[in-house]
Amino acid sequence: MKQPDVLFINGPNLNLLGKREPQIYGSGSYKDLCAFIDGFCGGAPHRIFQSNSEGDIIDEIQAAPGRADGIVINPAAYTHTSIAIADALRAVGIPYVEVHLTDPFSREPYRRISYVSDRALAVVTGLGFEGYRKAYGILTDSLAKGAARPADTAESSEPEDRND
Ligand code: DQA
């Protein structure tokens, strides 16, 4: 089987890693995280995307069919608020693993809900950068075994772009 093409999506404020509450998120920068991901992917095809904007993340998910076989997503704070990102993941039906640097489910009460966990192949929390490697391993293993796509997958996803 060809090596799966994996899309890594990082949500808001993760671009500030290293400067942002290092006592919680660690001292490694976002650039360090990207280098870490590039390292464990080796030569395998992958793309890393970060945005602070919910709409841009949704656009990236909608553009993934035909480009990515699987997604590793850290939606950051949108984990706890965005039904729209959860809907986009359901709509494209691409297998995904949810990852968090910390364990949000044992932090403040407002972090204890995730709208994306229910359809995730797995949820990896509390391992820092290492969690991305674990998430990638779980995803690629289950893709190799033929990870099931959720039932409501839209096979045809021609964008109906009528904003003209
Ligand atoms: C986070 C946890 C979220 O609650 C928080 O809003 C983040 C990062 C994590 O990786 O631990 O921005 O997703």
Image (cartoon, rainbow, N blue to C red):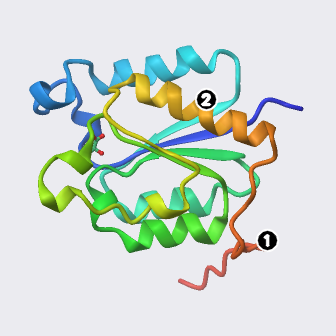
Who is closer to the viewer here, 33 or 53?
Answer: 33
Q: Residue at x 55, y 62 (%)?
A: 119
Q: What is the number of callouts on the image?
A: 2
Q: Secondary structure at mark 1?
A: loop
Disc ID at residue 155: 1
Would you place residue 144 above or below residue 88 in this image? Answer: above
Under mark 2, the amino acid is Gly
**Dividing the image into 4 quarters, which one contains the C terminus?**
bottom right
Mark 1 Cα-neighbour bin, 10 Å: few <14, some 14–19, many ≥20: few
Instruction: Give how far across and how far down residue 27 sits, in percent.
Output: 19, 18
Would you place residue 27 above or below residue 109 in this image? Answer: above
Disc ID at residue 122: none
Instruction: Give how far across and how far down residue 104 sits, in percent.
Output: 24, 47
Q: For ligand 1, tell me if the residue under mark 1 lies within 8 Å.
A: no
Q: Kindly identify which residue carries mark 2.
A: 137
- Where ligand 1 lies, by quadrant? top left
Front: mark 1 or 2:
2
Instruction: Give how far across and how far down residue 16 sits, in percent.
Output: 21, 34
Instruction: Give how far across and how far down residue 59 sits, in percent.
Output: 51, 63
Q: Is residue 28 left or right of residue 49?
A: left
Q: Residue at x 35, y 18 (%)?
A: 32
